[in-house]
Amino acid sequence: MEEQGVAASGGQKNVVIALVAVVVVLLAAIVGLVVLRKPAAPSTPATQAGGAGNTGGTTTGSTSGMPGSTSTDVPFDPKTATKVAAGKTPEDHVKAYFDAVLKGDYATAYALLPADKKAAQDEAAYAEQVKGYGITKYTIDDVSEKDGETQVLATATMAGGSFQYLWTFVKDGDGWLLKSRTLPGMN
């Protein structure tokens, strides 16, 4: 009888070991899916910029559409850079971008983004993301020129707070090219 008890006990150990192995494999698969999967819905600026309590005026980082999105590392190339419309200033370009966003004209706003932001996501994903932010107004805070570059600092106001964007333009003959758009203070 003792031998049967030992055999039964050994069989139960094998079953337990097999079940533990199955659980480990399932947990690894779940962790892999969570880590590798893209978000189902756009994240809000508040959660990406430090949580709902973040109501400070400045966030930082490189984004695609607005706060919370990612950017593709695309070096600035004057040949593929977004051009400021003839006869328009960098400040006019930034105003045109935010006016388009406020009107819900995401195709126009997308076209006014720098090349690296457009490379990070397509127009449909951008539109969905920016629509979720609910931007209600914007201000042009500062325009400065130095050594053939113009920087325009603008603040967008939305439900998650106010977020500053620094747009950098470079002189190109009689016109301007959009070099970048960043959130000041982010690395």
Image (cartoon, grey):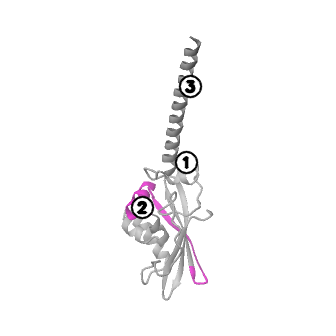
Q: Residue at x 56, y 23 (%)?
A: 10
Q: Is residue 172 left or right of residue 58?
A: left
Q: Which mark is residue 37?
A: none
Can residue 62 be seen at all in this image of the molecule?
yes
The residue to which callout 1 is attached is 52
Give the mark nearer the N terminus: 1 vs 3: 3
Question: Badge 1: few (under 14), some or many (20 or more) residues near its Cα, within 10 Å?
Answer: some
Residue 182 locus on image (x, y percent):
55, 67
Magenta range is 121-149
Could you tell me if the residues under marks 2 and 3 are in contact, i.e. CB atoms within 8 Å? no
State the separation of the CA atoms marked 2 and 3.
Answer: 54 Å
Figure label count: 3
The residue to which callout 2 is attached is 126
Q: Nearer the viewer, residue 20 or 182?
A: 20
Give the mark nearer the N terminus: 2 vs 3: 3
Name the front one of labels 1 and 3. 3
Q: Is residue 118 left or right of residue 11?
A: left
Q: Nearer the viewer, residue 134 or 18?
A: 18
Residue positioned most to the top: 1
Which secondary structure lies at badge 2?
helix
Which secondary structure lies at badge 3?
helix
Q: Residue at x 54, y 32 (%)?
A: 20
Can residue 114 be seen at all in this image of the molecule?
no
